[in-house]
Amino acid sequence: MSAGPTHLLYLHGFRSSPQSAKARRVGAWLAEHRPDVQFWSPQLPPSPRAAVAMLLEGTADWPATSVVVGSSLGGFYATAVAEARGWTAGVLNPAVDPARDLAAYIGENKQFHKPEESFFFLPEYVDELRALTVPAITRPERYFAVVATGDELLDWREMHARYAGATIRLVEGSDHALSDFDEHLPHLLRFLRLCD
């Protein structure tokens, strides 16, 4: 398949890492089926401003046909990047109002995949999240959202409303981590024009 994106950026969620199950699954699929696609899944710094600055700098020479996928807080960042770059985006149980939701996490937090490592989420990061919030997605047709009604951390109704007009795969049940991600991956890949 020659058409479609040549670059894919994958963004993990809060306290997560490029070692997340979904990040590794997307990377493994590309390595096997689309080795021509450049895949970047960086460890995001705790500062939202620094994270988005790093992403925009790291993708400065990527073509307009690039795509971005993000889970949870990574979905919030993916939306910011997609709006800044005009890219197509896939968001997986995306955070809609992380400035509100992450205020409870100010202080020291442990990494999911390396519990021995911790980081500090500073009060000013809430303001940085607020500043990065996109008022509304400008071209909903560029977005594919997987929204699970069983998400135990985020309200699926908020996610559904936030991406109104987008292609939404509303999943009955499941969970925040999308433990059934393999069921949704083919739909995501087709939307991103990575497979037939």
Image (tube, rainbow, N blue to C red):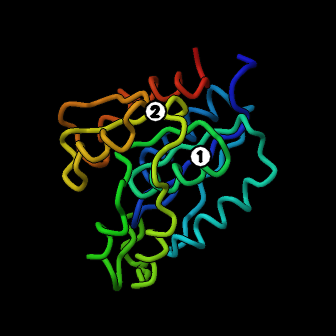
Q: Quadrant of the N terminus?
A: top right
C-alpha separation, residue under disc 1 versus residue under disc 2: 12 Å
Residue found 52% across the figure and 25% down from its top = 191
The secondary structure type at the circle numbered 1 is: helix
Q: Which residue is mark 1?
A: 82
Q: Quadrant of the C terminus?
A: top right
Is residue 64 in view? Answer: yes
* Most foreground residue, 107 or 161: 161
Outermost residue toward the right?
61
Label 2 is placed on what type of residue?
A: Phe
> Can you give x and y, in whole percent of width and height, for residue 57 in the image?
73, 62
Residue density around tag 2, few if under 14, some if 14–19, many if 20 or more, within 10 Å: many
Q: If you read the primary sequence from the N terminus, does the residue marked by circle 1 or circle 2 appear first?
A: 1
Label 1 is placed on what type of residue?
A: Ala
The secondary structure type at the circle numbered 2 is: strand
Where is 47 relative to 154, above or below?
Answer: below
> Can you give x and y, in whole percent of width and height, for residue 151 in the image?
22, 47
The disc label shown at residue 144, or none: 2
